[in-house]
Amino acid sequence: MGVTLYSLLLPDDRAVDPAWRGLLAPEERARADRFRRAADRQSFTAAHALARLALGRALGLDPAGLTFTATAKGKPVLCGGPVRLDFSLSHAEGAVAVALAPGEVGVDVETLRRIEIDQALAETALGAAAAARLGPDPSSPAWRAGFLAAWTAREAALKAAGLGLTAPMSGIRIAGATATFGHLRWRLWQSPLPPDHHLAAAWSGTPGLSHHPLDPAAFTAWCRGAAPPR
């Protein structure tokens, strides 16, 4: 088994379908309700519902009945699963993603809609050499897209390691489909999600990733108990 990756582009109305919310545990619904922005409530709810659906499908369990804990550095962990299965979830305004794998896995999705970036931020986040490779014009679409790709790849790797952003992103080196951080090494997969998102997954172990893009209608039907999309 390689990596199974689900991505979902969310509707622009920022609405939360009751079927999404119905899969969440009471504490997850409470966390969603604390977000002030409708877009953040939408993406949080969708990401956690999608994680439950993906894990329930993989393990043959009721998605609504799953329980979770977290590591000391915040990585979510499934409680009481019958097999070793790592997972990672990510949400940004307008998109969410969930990855499952038999070894360490991390996923990150980001949007160009609201990020404010310049050369100084790029150098701090990525390191001077990686920032220089983006080119001379931080206002250009190509520069911004390049920054987003570099950021998501590194954050996915840190999430696979269970470090989140507690370790310096600038310490990660990207070479083709590989990310390294000290003695740690991950396989890397990246893709734009048009019109304005970028998606990356990092994992340890065997090669192979299957990506399942979803639309809101298919996702809502899955939440309501329909057969999962292929």
Image: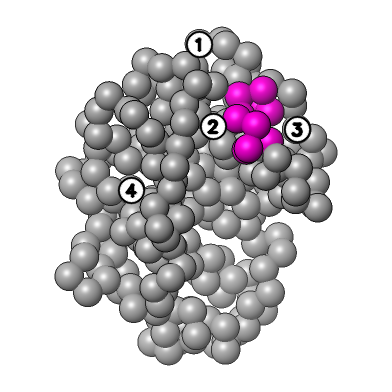
Q: Which residue is mark 3?
A: 16
Secondary element under disc 4, as helix, strand or loop, is: strand
Q: Which residue is mark 2?
A: 50
Q: Amino acid at mark 3?
A: Val
The CA span between labels 4 and 1 is 25 Å
Dots 3, 2 in contact, CB < 8 A: no
Q: Which numbered disc, 3 or 4, marks the residue that appears first in the sequence? A: 3
Indicate the quadrant containing the C terminus: top left, top right, bottom left or bottom right: top left
The CA span between labels 4 and 2 is 16 Å
Q: Around disc 4, counting alpha carbons within 10 Å, would you say few (fewer than 14), some (14 to 19), or many (20 or more)?
A: many
Secondary element under disc 1, as helix, strand or loop, is: loop
Scheme of colours in the image: one colour
Q: Which numbered disc, 2 or 1, marks the residue that appears first in the sequence? A: 2
Query: Which stretch is magenta?
Result: 20-29
Residue occupying image coordinates x 65% and y 62%: 112
Secondary element under disc 2, as helix, strand or loop, is: helix
Q: Which residue is mark 1?
A: 227
